[in-house]
Amino acid sequence: MPAAASPAPVPAATGTVTTDVPSRLDRLPWSRWHWMIVIGLGTVWILDGLEVTTVGSIAGRLSEPGSGLSITSAQVTGIAAALYVAGACAGALFFGWLTDRYGRKKLFMITLAVYLSATALTALSFGPWWFFTFRFLTGFGIGGEYAAINSAIDELIPARFRGRVDLIINGTYWLGAIGGALLSIVMLNTSIFPKDIGWRLTFGLGVVLGLVILLVRRHVPESPRWQFIHGRGEQAEELVSSVEEEIEEERGEPLPRAEGEITIEQRKSIGFGLIAKTVFGKYPKRAVLGLALFVGQAFLYNAITFGFGAILTTFFDVPTGSTGYYFAVIAAGNLLGPLLLGKLFDTLGRRVMISSTYLLSGSLLFVTAWLFDQGSLDAVTMTACWCVVLFFASAGASSAYLTVSEIFPMETRAMAIAFFYAIGTAAGGISGPLVFADLTKSGVVGDTVLAFQIGASLMCAAGLVAAFLAVKAERRSLEDIAAPLSTATGKAGATPSTSTAQAT
């Protein structure tokens, strides 16, 4: 695609420039070019869901004699899982900083390469230390993906579609989870594959799918918004012009005139101190909102999913080999939430939808906890309750990534995503298991009820925070929601809506 080709690199030059690139991007109609962006950047979450679910499913097989790896199930779900989480947190922060400094395209190529290489080497594991090392590096790559991908998507997708597209892309994690749950049933069948081969092929399949995504991703361009701020205004103009020409040819009619300009004092890099000062000093209420949303969804998901298999086997006598079918069902509920509710985040608005999805999922989990405590549920009805809870929770959790991506200035976007993702992941992957492990595995109904109630309480609290602090970002330009730090306010060419964006 000619519009997707990257311009020849030229040295960055700084100065004060006036540009209409953001308004031109936001007024574009949906096109094949946007589908290329979605497929090239968004489908990696399918791989993440596939990988995480697969590792959980193969834990028992890896610990069996003849698996080719001398490791225990507890080490897979404990040490390896903790290292994956630690890697994701570290990768998000490390690559998030690099993404804001060196651009979206360079980093979303590098992070996918790290992820795929580590996954391939995991398949070749011959000892626990090798497995642990590459689980950490796999997490390192996927953490970087969250920062690089979400920032690029939001800067390339028109404002009126941004909410639903971001939610649906993040929700596709659960399509991978469904595939991982069902794939593990086949790949771990010893009548089809030997014990020491099936689990390795599962990782290998993820690598093959990732290589296909990598080929598509080569055509995804750098963010023009990043380019014009970092002294590459000519490249941004050339890229947007080529996209406009492609879309006009596709539609057979000229595009409407774009309205609105912004004047920028270009700079080559943004210091970390300025990023932190902006996020927590200029936008303290938005920082509180981001923390509340990420921590709330992290604890709710751990309250339900951390002891998922133990709850089914302990309280409802479900055979261990059958839990994958139940997981596929609740994963489907997670997938449908963003798919069916995503459009409402752009029409009814962010505040209404974010607060309602958080409050509804938390409230419904309280009801599920009460029914479970009363002995009114069996394996099927419990799974049905989880499915409904996670239908709303998944849309809410996806909106957390959307929120922190769009409510902070462009220069801090990737780092903001990385920071809040790291906090949420640490809460869910470290604090969550510490809180919920003994509760859900104790075999005491009251302990599991308490786990549900903790997750539900934090989700409801986050919903209340969103009701008061959520930003009305629907159908608004990113520059209108939070003016870039490089905006030359008060100079000719700066639009009023951009230069006077309010900090809250």
Image (cartoon, helix red, strand yellow):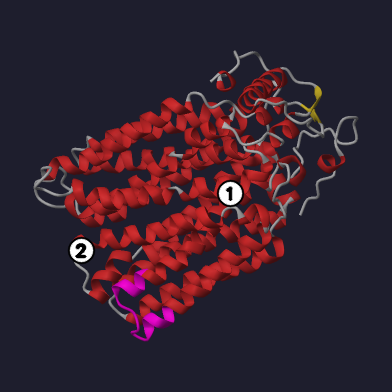
Q: SS for tag 1?
A: helix
Q: Position of residue 460 (x, y in %)?
A: 57, 70
**Would you place residue 228 above or below residue 39 in this image?**
above
Label 2: how many Cα within 10 Å (few below 14, some 14–19, many 20+): few
**For the stretch drawn in magenta, what is the main secondary structure?**
helix
Q: SS for tag 2?
A: helix
- Residue at position x 82%, y 34% in the image: 260
What quarter of the picture does the C terminus occupy? bottom right
Q: From which residue to which does the magenta span run?
A: 369-383
Residue under label 2: 320
Check if residue 269 falls in the magenta segment: no
- Residue at position x 11%, y 48% in the image: 190
Q: Position of residue 16 (x, y in %)?
A: 82, 24
Name the residue nearer the viewer: 500 or 349: 349
Label 1: how many Cα within 10 Å (few below 14, some 14–19, many 20+): many
Q: Is residue 113 left or right of residue 248?
A: left
Name the residue nearer the viewer: 374 or 296: 374
- In this rendering, does residue 76 appear at all? no
Q: Is residue 303 left or right of residue 488?
A: left
Residue type at mark 1 is Arg
Q: Position of residue 74 (x, y in %)?
A: 24, 57
Q: Position of residue 91 (x, y in %)?
A: 47, 40
Residue under label 1: 164
Q: Residue furthest front?
A: 252
Residue type at mark 2 is Thr
- Residue 413's image quarter? top right
**Would you place residue 13 above or below residue 212 in this image?**
above
- Which mark is in front, 1 or 2? 1
- Residue at position x 68%, y 60% in the image: 351
Spatial CA distance of label 1 from label 2 is 37 Å
**Would you place residue 30 above or below residue 265 in this image?**
below
- In this rendering, does residue 430 appear at all? yes
